[in-house]
Amino acid sequence: KAGVTQTPRYLIKTRGQQVTLSCSPISGHRSVSWYQQTPGQGLQFLFEYFSETQRNKGNFPGRFSGRQFSNSRSEMNVSTLELGDSALYLCASSPDRGNYEQYFGPGTRLTVT
Amino acid sequence: DQQVKQNSPSLSVQEGRISILNCDYTNSMFDYFLWYKKYPAEGPTFLISISSIKDKNEDGRFTVFLNKSAKHLSLHIVPSQPGDSAVYFCAASVGGSEKLVFGKGTKLTVNP
């Protein structure tokens, strides 16, 4: 079974621009979560989607948004990019909601200049 | 406020010996705990988990111990192998939520 895939793997953007990152979960997985990893804050939860609905949200500003499609694929969007948004963005999928381990993709490295 | 803490940024052990990675948490509502390992340029890989109704879970060379009264868990790797060298993250959640709260990680180096 193919793992979680994320595109693109690397991205360079300028302050003020917006960016969309994509995540394809493991086949059959219905829950998709997004995390931001930075050297200072570590891994922080952004949001979780299940059945095309946001079920959980972390403490990030409204510039961070996401969505999930009927095939469980998910996208996250960051508008009005700031230098501090430079990070590794990780997507994770799990078969269902509840105490299931999450499987992570390789991440998208976003650099904001 | 950091709810999940891994106080040792790094740990070095000899091949064949035991590696013990520690994790403390402050939120008594956490009831599900996981360990992940991460190699550079890859996403975290799930290792082992434990529910708060248990105090031990084993999977091959990996054992996780949970001490609820001390709000402490540990991951034991026996025997340690050079391929285990990676950053290990402890994570916790409440009520089966997908919102995982991660520690900042411990870098394990296993020397041949």
Image (cartoon, coloured by chain):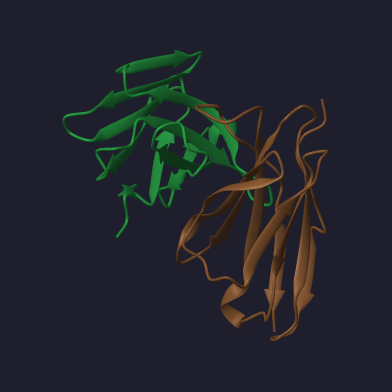
Chain colours: A brown, B green
- Res B107 seen here: no
Residue A4, quarter of picture: top right
Residue at 54% x, 38% y is B37
**Which quadrant holds residue B29?**
top left
A112 with respect to B64 (left or right): right
Residue at x 29% of width, y 18% of height: B55
The C terminus of chain A lies in quadrant: bottom right
Between residues B97 and B110, which one lies in front from this camera angle? B97
Q: Position of residue B76 (x, y in %)?
A: 38, 25
In this figure, what is the number of numbered marks? 0
Along the line of sight, which residue is nearer the eye, B38 or A74?
A74
Q: Is residue B48 left or right of residue A104?
A: left
Q: Quadrant of residue A11?
A: bottom right
Q: Position of residue B81 (x, y in %)?
A: 53, 27
Q: Residue at x 38, y 23 (%)?
A: B51
In the image, residue B20 above or below residue A70: above
Q: Is residue B30 above or below residue A60?
A: above
Viewer-nearest residue: A70 or B85: A70
**In the visual, does B62 lie left or right of B24?**
right
Q: Is residue B94 above or below residue A67?
A: above
Judge by depth and name the residue closer to the eye, A111 or B63.
A111
Going 72% across and 54% down the picture, which residue do you hit? A67
Quadrant in the picture for the N terminus of chain A: top right
The residue at the far left in this view is B69
Residue B23: give x, y in percent of width and height.
32, 40
- Across and down, in percent, residue A47 comes to 58, 52
> Would residue A7 be seen by someone viewing this image from the given angle?
yes
